[in-house]
Image: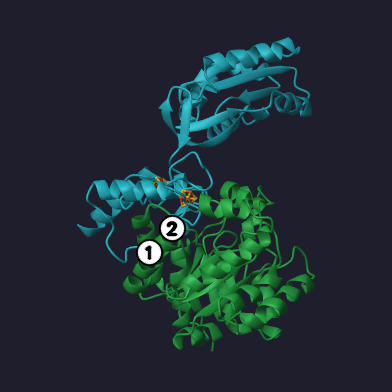
Amino acid sequence: MSRLREAFERGEFVITGEVAPPHGTDVSKMMRSVELLGPVTHALNVTDNQGATLHLSSLAASKAILDAGYEPIFQQTCRDRNRLALQSDLLSAGTLGLENVLILTGDDPRGGDHPQAKGVFDLDSTQLIEVAAGLNRGKDMNGAALEGATNLHVGAAAFPEAEPWDIQFERARGKAEAGAVFFQTQAVMDIDLFSERVAELRSKLGVKVIAGILLLKSGRVIDFINEKLAGLMVPDEIADRIRGASDPMGVAIELATEQVRALRDVADGVHIMSLGSDSVVPQILRGAGLD
Amino acid sequence: MIITRPRDPARIVENLETVGARSVFIVGCQQCATVAHTGGEVEVGELARFLTERGYEVSGTEVSEVTCHLAHTRVELRRHAEELSTADAVIVLTCGAGVQTVADAAPETPVFPGLDSAFLGNVIRNGVFEERCQMCGQCVLDLTAGICPVTTCPKGLLNGPCGGMWDGKCEVMTDRECTHVRIHNRLKAQGRARSQGSSIPAKDYSVKLKPGSVNLRAQRERARRKSGGDR
Ligand code: SF4
Ligand code: SF4
């Protein structure tokens, strides 16, 4: 059974990290991240052609991580596959022993490295969540019985600080009704606002919420987030703190540690996005008393 | 209406060279291509001048009333039978449907497109066109307050917004409001906020298999035979 699901059921505060499959076939660099992050997390998200740029499939990379003895969260976006391919990959996940799946819309191909590609979006994320829930009941999306059901632990993305909140909340409700049992959020920026909204998600939808933490390791990272990442804006007081520091990485670690500590009473876990600086993750968790 | 864009003139000249054409007949259309300013009297005249300047002979021109109407176009081209018979090629400044109609009406002569067909467009005002419908064959406007998510959400999501929506704005086309925010707000303003558990189900693309075809005559004939048989 999914260790992530077990941890949720035990009421444990869960920790997830993130690794990116390579742009090629050599997984050694990714596996070095896995070896660093795997021992200190419950599970690792494995991105799916992130940013609409070509990478090894999340399915293959997730299997490699499972074989190494760690727990992957297989990410599946709606961008690159039609409903046959999506269902087929979810069935494959079942056969390969992958249980956690995070279902996302996916970035538009226009922003990626193959802007000529056709964005498929045959299904949207809500519809795909419903399909995954159906596969768990042994039915394909047309209701036909499967020879062997899946046992997927289905997650989705939530955006607690994004406005307008009423629309975001409805969207999350749609996903929960479709069958998502856990949510991973975009990076926390304003803890108070975040806490209020996560409380609403947890109480009204009965879902588990894992809060996103982004390591703001330099002024450059902040600029990148503010300019390039739709849906995220680093608040001035945080940006100033990093920009004014003589050791920005040190301050970023401090900030992330504070956030993790503060979120222990707010969310069901944290998802740490270290942007390549995987070696500091254990330090953050130790600092927050989570090792 | 069908929005068309002019094609690179060099490509048109290349096309003519493939058949060694010296004499050319040009067809436009009084409907969409006229409104789109790509294949009306003006543009047909411009192409005629362009080709004449490059040493081609323009044997004649015709801006048909509805070029995609096969019966009509046959009649109109018959009036130009002589000019057509001396032409080595025909260039058609209409959508792809019009080009094919002309190609069927004049099957002995090589027919080349002079435009690219872009989309089914709304005329926002003269010269400003926007795509609002992709003719998906299974309209959801009844559920979406008259705003099409299939077309105006760059990802075509039926349930949204996606995670990139920020402050009501679209992630992909950042100068625009997110389609799903617009839908939500209009539904709400009309007091029709969508009820709980009512995500829009996945589309059935089998209703939109190509080539599409509707034959009202055959339908009526079938209906008549059926009611006759019942009597
Ligand atoms: S849903 Fe959109 S694309 Fe489909 S028929 Fe209606 S307006 Fe056209
Ligand atoms: S922001 Fe809204 S309109 Fe833009 S791609 Fe996402 S869901 Fe579609």
* Picture residue at 72% right of the left edge, 79% below the top: A35
Above/below status of B140 relative to A39: above
Quadrant showing the N terminus of chain B? top left
Residue A100 placement: quadrant: bottom right
Q: Nearer the viewer, residue A7 or B165?
A: A7
Q: Earlier in the sequence, mark 2 or mark 1?
A: 2
Q: Badge 1: few (under 14), some or many (20 or more) residues near its Cα, within 10 Å?
A: some
Q: Could you say where residue B139 lies in the image, as x and y percent from the top left?
A: 37, 50
Would residue A247 be found to the left or right of residue B37 on screen?
A: right
In depth, the one of A271 and B31 nearer the eye is A271
Amino acid beneath label 2: Glu
Residue A72 position, x and y percent, is 61, 78
> Distance from label 2 to label 1 (Cα)?
8 Å
Q: Nearer the viewer, residue A6 or B81?
A: A6
Q: Is mark 1 within 8 Å of ligand 2?
A: no
Question: Label 2 neighbourhood size at 10 Å, few (<14), some (14-19), many (20+)?
Answer: many
Q: Residue A283 in the image: state x and y as whole percent.
A: 65, 75
Q: Colour of chain A?
A: green
Q: Which colour denotes chain B? A: cyan
Please say whether residue A115 is visible from this viewpoint.
yes
Circle 2 residue: A161
Residue B55: image quadrant is: top right
Pointer 1: what residue?
A197
**Chain label for disc 2:** A
Residue under the point 43% across and 58% down? A161
Do labels 2 and 1 touch, CB within 8 Å?
yes
Q: Residue at x 39, y 58 (%)?
A: A168
